[in-house]
Image (cartoon, rainbow, N blue to C red):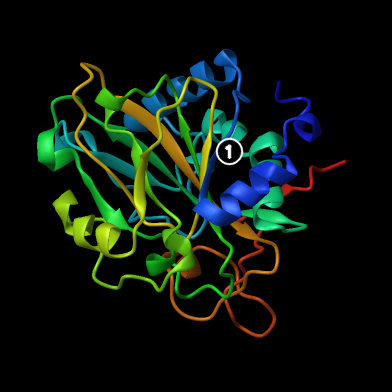
Amino acid sequence: MTNEPFTLLPTDDDVAFYRENGYWISPPVLSDEMLDAAEHGMRRHYAGDIDREVPGDPDRSFWGWRPADGDVLRKNDYASLRVTELAHLVSQSVIAGCAARLADAGEIRLWHDQLLYKPSGSNRQGNVGWHTDRHYWRGCSSQEMLTAWVPFHDITEAHGPVMFVAGSHRRDEQADLSFFDQDLTTIDHYVAEHDLRIVTATLSRGQVSFHHCKTIHGSGPNHSGEARRSIAIHLQPGDNHHIATHNNDRLVAPRPDGAPDYADPDVCPRLWPPAR
């Protein structure tokens, strides 16, 4: 499937849906073999078995979850820069090609990724608070950055799937929302006031969900009996550039003018169009 990205890109109707709602869920576009390999890469990362260090992070300050942290919600940034199997998944042309269509961008580069693991039975402690990605990316010039969320297995209601507030990307940003606020009732008044709706993204293995950087999203507890395992791939249009500080600034090389280079191929490689 992944060898035919041009036949799997969003249609005009799909793009219109994304523009209206701020999210889009693909058909199955990733093979079981690729996702099996990604799961193997996830296990390797958690065991500290990596293929390379993240450029600019010799002390591993951006490593994230470690075994000593226990069986909690895990987040490991820049995992694809460390582990080959995860880099292979992140670089799939079908993912970047879908993002390019949705963002109306001629070029898509990696911004960064987050390896995610939500243990079963996590209750409220496993919640991801309502937030927008743009809130954390205000140092970027682009308003069209987006995220591809790739689960490694089927995602049911019981897994604590990602939830989107459909259409919220077209409204003023809610500054009081936070990834770390595990009280998911904080959005209820906003949704009712603006006549919006919350959509739960249940997916079959091989499907990918995409959301706009201004779309409000979060997720609840996992009661499935198995850990929810996934990777979030944050993507930037090729014209995105530095305005103010972000963690990426410590990793990328400087441009000739001294500003951080968000086109640094070692940290933010080009994913679309595919290399010929």
> Could you tell me residue 32's position as x and y percent?
55, 14
Q: Residue 256 versus residue 24: which sits nearer the camera?
A: 24
Identify which residue is drawn at 31% across, 43% down.
Answer: 75
Q: Can you say whether 12 is above or below 243 in the image?
A: above
Identify which residue is drawn at 71% across, 58% down.
Answer: 104
* Label 1 crowd bin: few (<14), some (14–19), many (20+), radius 10 Å: many
Instruction: Kindly identify which residue carries mark 1.
Output: 90
Quadrant in which the N terminus appears: top right
Identify which residue is drawn at 47% across, 75% down.
Answer: 139
The picture quadrant where one finds residue 105 is bottom right
> Could you tell me residue 92's position as x and y percent?
66, 35
> Could you tell me residue 62's position as x and y percent?
36, 54
The answer to whether residue 128 of the structure is visible from this angle is yes
Number of marks in picture: 1
Going by the numbered disc 1, the residue's amino acid type is Val
Quadrant in which the C terminus appears: top right
SS for callout 1: helix
Q: Can you say whether 260 is above or below 40 in the image?
A: below
The answer to whether residue 214 of the structure is visible from this angle is no
> Could you tell me residue 219's position as x and y percent?
28, 42
Identify which residue is drawn at 59% across, 70% down.
Answer: 142
The picture quadrant where one finds residue 8 is top right
